[in-house]
Amino acid sequence: MPTNILYISYDGILEPLGQSQVLSYLEKLSKDRFFFLITFEKKEDKNNQQLVNDINLRIKKSKIKWYPLIYHKRPTALATFLDIFYATVLGYWLILRYKLKIIHSRSYVPSVAALILKKISNVKYIFDMRGLWADERIDGGIWNKSSYLYKISKRLEKEFLLNSDVVVCLTKKAVKEIKGFEYLKGKMPIFSVIPTCTDLELFTPILNSTDLKKIKNSFIVGYVGSVGVWYLFDEAIECFKLIKDIEPRSIFHIINKGDHSYIYDCLNNAGIDKNSVLVEEKDHKSVVDAMQLMNVGVFIIKPLYSKIASMPTKLGEFLGCGVPCLCNSGVGDMPEIVNNNKVGVVLKNFSKEEKIKSIDSLFDLILDPNTKYRCRETALRYFSLDEGVKKYNEIYFSLD
C-alpha cells in the first residue's frame, strides 16, 4: 500500500503560486495516497472567506489533510525561526499520529523543519530545492556574501543535500552544478529533474474562429508577469520597438500586478506611443484568454549565477498556448528547449545587432504555420503537469 506523505510548503495555497505549483500537483498525486499538507498562509488571504471556502472545496475532493499556519513576516530572522518551529512541532505530531514515513519539503525554509524531523524520527526526506535560494538572495541584492544569513543558508543547503534521500531540481544545469560541490564527492544524493509544470488543459491554443480573426487582424507582443528584480524590462521594451519597426500594427500587451507606474515610466522614457501599449491586471483565467491571442511572448531575465537553476513558469504557459517566445541565454535549460525545438529565439547577448538578427529569425518562425503545433508539442513534452505528477509518483514509490 502506498505510503502517506507529509508535505511542507512555505508558499501558501491561498496564493496563485501555491495553487498552481502545490495544490494542482497534490490533487492529482493524492489519487494514490494521503497527503498531510502544511502551508504558511498570509493573514489577508486567510481573512478572504470566499477564497478559503473555494480552496477547502477543492481539498475535500482529494485525499489531502490541510494544516494552514500563519506566515510571519517581521522581524525577518525571528519570524522565520517561529515558522520553522511551528512546522517542526506540527510535523512531528503528524508523523507520530499518522505513522508517516516520507517528508516532501518544498524549498529551503521548510527543509530546516524537514531536516530536524528526519534526524529525530528517521523518515525519508525529499529536498525539493526549486533553485539556489541563498545565491538568489545574493544575485537579487538582498544579502551579500559576507552576511551571516548567507553563510548559515549555505551551511544548511549542504546539510539538506547530504541528508536528503532524493533532491528535486528544476533544471539539468542545476544538477550538473551541484554535483560539482566538493563536499558531495562520495556522498552524492539521488537527483530528479522536474521543471516548473503548467496545467496544459487550461493553457491551450485558441480554437474559436472569432478569436482567430482577431489574431490575423493585429500583431500582439505579450509580456506577462513581473518587471522587477530578475527581469530586464528595458531590454524587453527595446525588443518591442524593433518588432514594431518590422510590423507597424504591433501592440505591446503587458499583464502585470502592482508595477503599472514603473511600467509607464519605462515606456515613456523609451518613447513608446501610448496607443501601441495595453497595460492590464488580470485574474488567472483572464491571463490565459489574453495569452492565447498573443503572437509572441517576450521576457528577458538577468543571466545571473543563480538563474542556472531556474525555469520560468511563463515559458510553459506561452508554449502551451502555441505562442513562440523571445527570451535570452543564461537561464536554466530554457535556451536548449527553445532552440532545439524551434519554438522561439534566444538572445545570445543584448547588443542591438543581436536583437535585430534574432527578431528577423523570430518572424520567420511566426510565419511558419507549423510553429504553433511545435510550441504545443514542446509544452506537452517538457512542462505537462501530468508528466510532473508522474515523476513525483516515481520518487514516492521508490521510497515506499
Image (cartoon, helix red, strand yellow):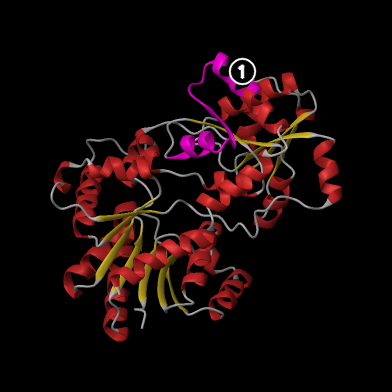
The image position of residue 174, as x and y in percent, is 34, 43
Is residue 206 in view from this perspective? Answer: yes
Compared across the picture, whether 280 is left or right of 382 comes to right
In the rendered structure, which segment of residues is drawn in magenta? 333-360
Secondary structure, mark 1, is: helix
Where is residue 47 drawn, in percent x and y?
Answer: 56, 69
Quarter of the rendering occupied by the C terminus: bottom left
Q: Is 186 left, or right, of 76 in this rendering? A: left
Q: Residue placed farthest to the top in the image?
A: 353
Report how many numbered discs are placed on residues in the image: 1
Few, some or many C-alpha atoms within 10 Å of disc 1 (few <14, some 14-19, many ≥20)? some
Question: With 286 as the anchor, is 193 left or right in this view?
Answer: left
**Does the magenta run of residues contain 182?**
no
Q: Dividing the picture into quarters, in which one does residue 81 lie?
A: bottom left
Q: Which residue is drawn at the image coordinates 67% and 20% (left, top)?
A: 242
Q: Can you give x and y, in whole percent of width and height, for residue 214 in the image?
A: 83, 41
